[in-house]
Amino acid sequence: MSQLPALVEALLDPKAYPERPRRIDLIQTQMSFVFLADDYVYKVKKPVDLGYLDYTTLEKRRLYCRREVELNRRLCPDAYLGVVAITGEKGATVGGQGEVVEYAVKMRRLPQEKMMNALLAQGQVSAEMVVRVADKLAEFHRSAETSAAVSVFGDLAAIIQNTAENFAQTEKYIGNTIPLERYQSIKAYTDGFIRGNASLFRKRMADGRIRDCHGDLHAAHICFTDGICIYDCIEFNDRFRYCDIASEVAFLAMDLDHYGWPDLSRGFVDAYMVYSQDRELPELLDFYKCYRAYVRGKVESFKLDDPHIPPQDKMKVKDIARRYFELAESYI
């Protein structure tokens, strides 16, 4: 553990990499150190246990690096190059000889300006582009794994576990990022919808609509470059990835609403229904939009507890979280 900051510092030296990049930029997330090295990206997982993920041992980090590459090659095959070892000789060497001290996922660097969230901010996402995303997603869902073990995550018990966890984990933010009345309103709607639609949820399981999905399908994870690359799926917890395909569609539809593009959101959903022939999707759409917006509000709220985020950035985080919770309530 005490070695990690020194390792990160060593990986900021271009000499640590076989390509000898001109510069290294570091991005931190709650889970990873991400090194931008000219045309490549090296992603090192932090040795943390966040409850919903456990990267605390080197063996676990190697396992989840491999899972990340394997799962993301389903929707973004050309970007995920593999897992590389980092050895401790001369500070740190990527792909070097000697004792392995860490592992990294190696990717081709995707153009930031081609990300859907960046394009939305510039008003450069067309109706035809979201139709293409819908086509790619429907094709992916048709071939995505399903089984009895996967389908059980569409059971009422699993849905209740996910939603109850959301409300339990956001209680501490009541009065901060979410007013009490909004919290109670969303919770009452969610609990009532689940109780009132038990037969629909069971039918979705029986019809094979619960699949091994992407799990984190929002605009920042879609890149329009040499086709469409949908990357950075959830590899660390199967429970967050095994879901009703309606939940996955609702995630991106909700995010398009969040960015202020409801017409694109409707166009995306309509196109997906044509490609997938999923007639029941409209019955579930608002429920899952509410659920996904609430999850995004929760995740943003978590950042308020991160000691590495400066106070001025936390003001922006608070505003984003509030807007996601407000959006969640709008679907009731």
Image (cartoon, grey):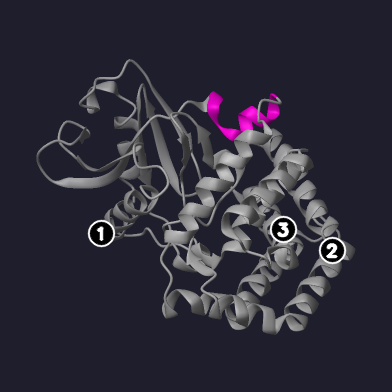
x and y, in percent, of residue 314 in the image: 69, 40
x and y, in percent, of residue 61 in the image: 31, 55
Q: Is residue 255 above or below residue 145?
A: above
Q: State the residue position of label 3.
A: 289
Task: For the C terminus, give its image quadrant.
Answer: bottom right
Task: Give the SS element for disc 1.
Answer: helix
Tag 3: amino acid: Lys
Q: State the residue position of label 2.
A: 332
Task: Give the SS element for disc 2.
Answer: loop
Asked if one can make out residue 55 in the rendered structure from this viewpoint, the answer is: yes
Tag 2: amino acid: Ile
Q: State the residue position of label 1.
A: 59
Please indicate whether residue 313 sits to the left or right of residue 95 in the image: right
Of 138 and 218, which appears nearest the observer? 138
Are discs 1 and 2 less than 8 Å apart at CB? no
Q: Is residue 158 above or below residue 108?
A: below
**Residue lying farthest right?**
181
Q: Is residue 77 above or below residue 174?
A: above
Residue sitting at x 73%, y 63%: 282
For the record, the magenta segment spans 113-122
Asked if one can make out residue 307 in the rendered structure from this viewpoint, the answer is: no
Residue sitting at x 22%, y 46%: 101
Residues packed near mark 1 inside 10 Å, few (<14), some (14 to 19) or many (20 plus): few
Q: CA distance from mark 3 to mark 1?
A: 36 Å
**Residue lying farthest top?**
22
Task: Give the SS element for disc 3.
Answer: helix
Name the image quarter holding residue 77: top left
